[in-house]
Amino acid sequence: MIRDTTIGARLWAVAVWTLTGFFVLNIAAMMATVITSSFSTRWLQSWLPQAYTTRWYISAWREFQLGDVLLTTFQIVFTVVALSALFGVPAAYALARRDFPGKRLLLLLFLLPLLVPPMTFGIPLATVLYQVGLGGTFWGVVLANLVPSVPFVVMVLIPFIEQIDPKIEAAARVFGANTFQLFRHILVPMLTPAVLAALLLVLVRTIAMFELTFLTAGPTSQTLVVALYYSVFAAGVRAVQSIDAMAVIYTATTLIWLLIALRFVNPTQIIGRAH
């Protein structure tokens, strides 16, 4: 019986690792294909391109105005991150420390944008933004992305705040600390890893958020992922290599910010503290 259980566990482990390896191999193959295509001069009916060049990156930069698109992307992303912290951190503290009628309902409302597909609430949200004159503008895109970002920050920070002993805050107040001093000198240092983790994920989510940005962006407020979509499906004939070069730039942009953030944040430590 023990031997049968051991064999079954080994077979299950082999199956899991095989499926995982197959998935990773497919992802790596797709990425390698796109990267190779972005540097190829001609690639037809052969395993490798006939030659390599970087001119498709120059072409994509000029054709799709990537300088302006990247600037707009960074402006939107950092605005969303800053406002998410400004509104999300105090809201998380209030929900973690206070009990009041309707708290469970409020938590449910915060969860809905995270559980429901963005397109479900994105269409009515975009309709409202266009009716008030914010659709197609920079602030319209920012407001649309704040809808899931602020609840995300709140839900990530609540468990961390609940782990902080209220007696520490009470002791600080006994020694004369007001609310601002308490928040600045006591809570901020203790919550910095959690806040960085939440804002890191907000940054990556906003860069990759297609639906809400697509529904609310105008010609001058497109992020890189929306510009990539238009480059693929817009009318006209475009070189596949230029589009692949744009896709590589988008992926590299996301990975660079992720690596920068991971330089200052240890994900395993953050997860451990959350549990």
Image: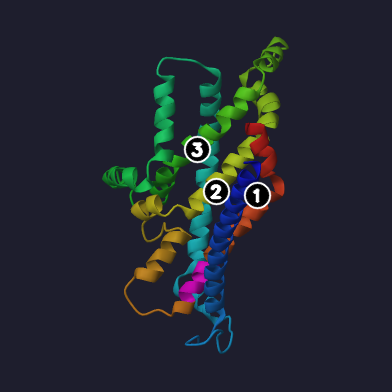
In the image, residue 31 sits, relative to residue 77, either above or below, namely below
Prevalent SS, magenta region: helix
In the image, residue 1 sits, relative to residue 207, either above or below, namely above
Q: Which residue is drawn at 48% across and 57% down?
A: 72
Q: Which residue is drawn at 40% across and 60% down?
A: 220
- Mark 2, residue position: 203
Give percent across and percent down for residue 254. 57, 58
Question: In the rendered structure, which amino acid carries the disc numbered 3?
Answer: Phe
Q: Where is residue 266, by image quadrant?
A: top right
Instruction: Determine whether label 3 and label 2 are within 8 Å by CB.
Output: no
Q: Is residue 20 left or right of residue 192?
A: left
Who is closer to the viewer here, 136 or 37? 37
The stretch of residues the image draws in magenta is 242-248
Say if the magenta span includes residue 246.
Answer: yes
Give percent across and percent down for residue 259. 66, 55
Say if the magenta span includes residue 10.
Answer: no
Of marks 3 and 2, the one in the foreground: 3
Residue 261 bears which disc, if any? 1
- Mark 3, residue position: 152
Question: In the rendered structure, which amino acid carries the disc numbered 1?
Answer: Ala
Circle 2 sits in a helix, a strand or a loop, which is it?
helix
Instruction: Determine whether label 2 and label 1 are within 8 Å by CB.
Output: yes
* Mark 2 vs 1, N-terminal side: 2
Q: Is residue 154 left or right of residue 112?
A: right
User: Is residue 198 among the parts visible in the rendering?
Assistant: yes
In the image, residue 16 sits, relative to residue 65, either above or below, namely above
* Mark 3 vs 1, N-terminal side: 3
Marks 3/2: CA distance? 11 Å
Q: What count of labels does the image hold?
A: 3
Question: In the rendered structure, which amino acid carries the disc numbered 2?
Answer: Leu
Marks 3/1: CA distance? 18 Å
Q: Residues within 10 Å of mark 2 (few under 14, many from 20)?
A: many
